Image: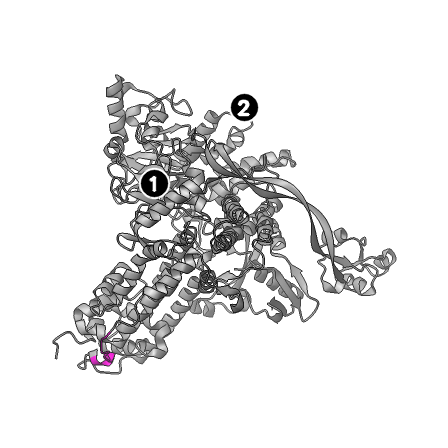
Amino acid sequence: MEASHVYINECAVQADATAQYKIGKEYVDFQKISTKRSVLADSLFLRFMQSSITRIGGDFSKDFIVLKFNYDANYKISDGVEEKLSKEELRTLYYKNGVTFISEVKDAKSKQKLSSEEDRCHSIHYKMLMRSPGKAKDGDCVFIRDNLYHKAINFLTMGLYDLMNEEAKKNPNKVFKIVELSAYLTLTTAAANGYIRIPWNRILVVPDEEVYSKRMNAVIVQSEPVTRTYEKKEFYIDFDSPKTEKLINKKGFTFDEEKAKSHDLTYIAKTKKALIDNGIRWNRYYGYSEIVEEDVTRDECFAHYVSDEKVKNILWDGMGLIDESIFPKDMNGFIYCRSHFFKSCLFRGNIQDFFKDYCKEHGFDYKNFTTEKIDMFERKLSLSNIDVVITDKSLKWLKFVDVMSCGQKVDPKDAFKYYKQYMKSHDNWFSIVKTAHSSKWGDMQLMAYQMDNSLPTTDKNVLGRIADQSVQFCNELKLADDEAYLKYLDQRKNNFNINEMLIELVKWNPDFRRTEFFRSKKTKDISKLKNEYFKQGRLLQNGDNLTIMDNPIALLLKAVGADPLQEGCFDVVEDGVQCYTPRFKAGDRLAAFRSPHNSPNNIIHLYNIYPDRLVKYFPNIGQNVIVFNAIGTDTQPRLSGHDVDSDFVYTTNQPDLAELARIAYVNYPTIINGVEEKGSSSYHFVLEDFAQMDNKIASAQESIGTSTDTAQLALSYYYDEGMISEELKKCFVILSVIGQISIDLAKKEFNIDVVNEINRIKRLPCMKDKDIPAFYAATKKSRNNKDFDMDKIRSMNCPMDIIADYIDEKVIGRADGIDHLPIRNFFNKQVIGKGNRYKKEKLIRLAKSYNDSIRYLENNKDQYTDDCFINLKITNMNQFLNRASKSLDQETIMQLVIYALKDDNSDVSSIILNFLFREHHDEFMNFFVKKYQK
């Protein structure tokens, strides 16, 4: 629910009056708080809280609410004075005081048992628990019923909350790492695809390794303070106006000391601070605004090109290795694990085989080899018992060793004892939140427009060849035999669409593909592919998203105390980086891109090789993992500061893309993020500071998308103007770093305001008041429903517009050539009858309600993670299935099919047909004539 709605409702109830809230420029009557169901997915946290949660009607619970802080509260009470509370103020208010929500019994039977409205409604008080795990970076927040708060927060923080709270009481001025605490306490709330239990005496922890390249070309982005004169709107309050005096009198205050005594009012000074301190928020009735000039000093980013930078990588940052003997049989390639202040992507391998071979080759006793000189905490573990190897970067609790040492001398070994004991008390469980999976497009995968528009060329022939795979795919789908289209339906089928139904109906009667229903869906699918996928840069190439793994043999060498830099698997090359992936053949040249991707400086050129030791000890990493050589190279900064805790790269061997990747790697130097992090936290352990932190994070998260959008405009102008502008080059280079920082702000603080920096770049002469590229306008219209002035839109000489024009030119027009048949020709005339009207109408009502829920989710998809979005769709589908009748007769099914196939009912057609196909399969199929059936 929206915090602004909650607040306006509270004000209306308190005043016992109606409220109006502002939408655009209009005020409308406030009816009630709008709520939608959210999902807490299966997780370590949910399993821990299981016994304490009160459920209503299955899995529904009112113990948690998600509060969104998207809008200010602009409102009036009974057509009175306009009032406003900003979304930032709302967050502070509810973080500090919690939120009380009036919950109403909605079940009809339960309502009847309760005589009065007072019995049917009851208030629940909630306390702020955590940023929503669904969109932790957006600043949406999960609140929990107050009597469950202490149990929940101490599980999430491993007891650190109580320890910090005690320290804060002793020393209120002490600052704490609440940015990091808030980022990592949600790790146990991640949606689990499975669980694994690993005792800590079978996990070896080694320090990571910082490695540097030889001196190379680079572009370093740093920030420096700059003073500039800005215009700003200043609001002046007319403290001496009788009108202002009347306004504050209504709120119980006065500027007149004598009046305060005689009228039972509170005297306050004539200052803005006095108004703020007493909760008075002014508006236009209090005074007037003027534009004034102000000198402001802010940090701004500058890009410096150098030729002698030694580029740093951190080996194994966030990854680990897991022995084949305990790797889950239903997983592939890797398991991305999370637990208390722990996250690590564990790649499968024969690590015990490596240990045995190493000991044999070097004359060590494998059975008696111990790790006290190797393990980070000097534990004496037996090498033969080690199942997992990780580095310190997977242990997020290391940032809190001062708290975990309980006031004693700071010692990571003591902190590890605390952590190990806590994990043991919870049976050493880790959730598996991700594993490798292949593309839904077979051997192909979709690119993104950010990748296409960063390709360093405007050569129409080259870009045409890059688009050819998609053009060919589209044209094959249009062929009259429908074989390619049926294969496409099979690739894209799921429980939410009717693809499987169409495939089976065509098998049932091959002539079904001649129906207007089938031909219409085919036309819509191809149109969507062409216009919403391919023309918007989502091009198909031979390739896939491959999860990155850094130098695993080096990590195994580190685990036995040897020099990891002597792994001997890769060489350093001048115009790219060597890698290993079974997805492509040895000798293939590859292009790779990672999101966020904002410039040609982020493209990496790869040479795929098959090192013997990698093939021997990692035979089962599969087709969706790629091993980078991070020793002596620039892979991490090149790919926008990637780490290896399940980060992936889009990788293809398309020849033109591989060559353009080589050109980009040579001619567009790697970007180094030199913007400094803040040295220490400025936050205290009070809820107001948590609110201040989350407000900053929420405002900065919009900058992830905004920095990418602005970079795309800079790139388009750069190409359109002949690829010569150094100013535009520096724009997209800086924006690449801003994108990185915006993501990292959820767990770090930097000496730069990303919103101000993006706005500064937008105002530069090389960016300001320019036309909008046609592809950009189309993409923003399709994805954000944003319109631009048509006079400002034009097709530019940039890669994306060239590709879109090529697709328009090369995709063939109507290639059907098939006479369409009415679908009624395929109805089984032996099935007749009116059916059960009540059951038919009930199913239609349920289908419409389900459709409304799904449309809401689709329209707000960007508010959820992929896992949360799918979980919500599944939850809504299951609710629909549970309520829909399982006892429909053949005649009722017939009536429902006829209803669903009418054009006027297209909004629920797929839902009804899919339900009947899956839940009443035989009766559904029997309604259609089988081939040769008379």
Q: Report the predominant secondary structure element of the magenta stretch.
A: loop
Left or right: residue 727 versus residue 455 is right
- Residue hosting label 1: 606
Does dot 2 land on a helix, a strand or a loop? loop
**Quarter of the rendering occupied by the C terminus:** bottom left
Extreme residue in the top direction: 363
**How many badges with numbers are in the image?**
2
767 or 42: nearer the viewer: 767
Q: Which mark is residue 409?
A: 2
807 or 231: nearer the viewer: 807
- Residue 143 in view of the camera: no
Question: What is the CA distance from the residue labelled 2 to the residue labelled 1?
Answer: 47 Å
430 or 854: nearer the viewer: 854
* Segment colored magenta: 817-825
- The residue type indicated by label 2 comes to Lys
Query: How far across and down, in percent of the image, does residue 22 sit?
Result: 61, 67
Q: Quadrant of residue 602?
A: top left
- Residue 521 in view of the camera: yes
Left or right: residue 254 versus residue 708 is right
Does dot 1 land on a helix, a strand or a loop? strand
Left or right: residue 221 versus residue 895 is right
- The residue type indicated by label 1 comes to Leu
Q: Of callouts 2 and 1, which one flags the residue occurring earlier in the amino acid sequence?
A: 2
Of circles 2 and 1, the one toward us is 1
Q: Quadrant of residue 118?
A: bottom right
Query: How far across and down, in percent of the image, does residue 183 sit?
Result: 50, 43
Query: How far across and down, in percent of the image, does residue 600 sit?
Result: 44, 47
Query: How far across and down, in percent of the image, does residue 325 sit?
Result: 25, 34
